[in-house]
Image (spheres, rainbow, N blue to C red):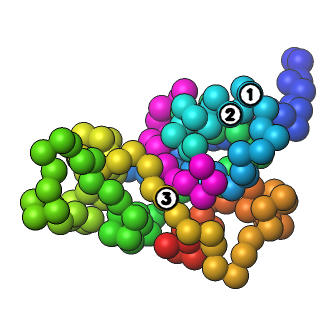
Amino acid sequence: MEKKKTTAKTEEKVKPSSASGKLIAVIRIDGEVKVKPEIRITLDNLRLRRKYSCVIINPSNKSHMGMIDKVKYQVAFGEIEKETLVKLIEARAEIIKDSTHDKKNEKKIDAEMIASSLIGGKKLIELGIKPFFRLHPPRKGIKSKLNYPKGVLGNNKKDINKLIERML
């Protein structure tokens, strides 16, 4: 009959959603100056190498969720909706170029198909698209030093969609 003590640290852990088909968007908010080496390595592993870069990850991957938990004070993350994902792909997706790439042979990106494939479990690299998106700074600004809900750092839940649309 022992009661488990819950600390603030265990309650803050990132909880992956159990629903299949949900993806998490992670946006780097913090810059590159005065970042601890272990945080920098984790951001590099997530492919968040520059400020305002974005990656889409699957919440069922526990190693990625652990990395997000480690860098939650440098990034904004939340569950991305399909409509926002389609807009993000249309506006910011880049095709992986090979050595035989010409401007004449440039393919068009089918955002709906790519979004459906991502939700189905495929990766961006398998679809021939770079695994990160470069975004603009958000229109109307952000409070980049404060945690959500006063600022944007940490888990933004559904409000990440509004932030991404301001950054397209």
User: What residue is drawn where x is 63% and y is 73%?
Assistant: 138
* Marks 2 and 3 close (CB-CB < 8 Å): no
| Residue 25 percent coordinates (x, y) | 52, 53
Near mark 2 (Cα within 10 A), the count class, few <14, some 14-19 or many ≥20, is some
* Marks 1 and 2 close (CB-CB < 8 Å): yes
Residue extent of the magenta highlight: 50-63
Sequence-wise, the earlier of marks 2 and 3 is 2
User: What residue is drawn where x is 16% and y is 50%?
Assistant: 101
Above or below, 70 against 159 in this view is: above
| Residue 73 percent coordinates (x, y) | 77, 46
Report the amino acid beneath label 2: Arg
| Residue 24 percent coordinates (x, y) | 51, 50
In the image, taking residue 148 as reference, residue 124 lies left or right, namely: left
Q: Given the current orientation, which residue lies at the most extreme top position?
A: 1
Q: CA distance from mark 3 to mark 1?
A: 23 Å
Residue at the spot of label 3: 134
User: What residue is drawn where x is 30% and y is 41%?
Assistant: 125
Above or below, 41 against 46 in this view is: above
In terms of image quadrants, where is residue 108? bottom left
Residue at the spot of label 1: 37
User: What residue is drawn where x is 67% and y is 59%?
Assistant: 156
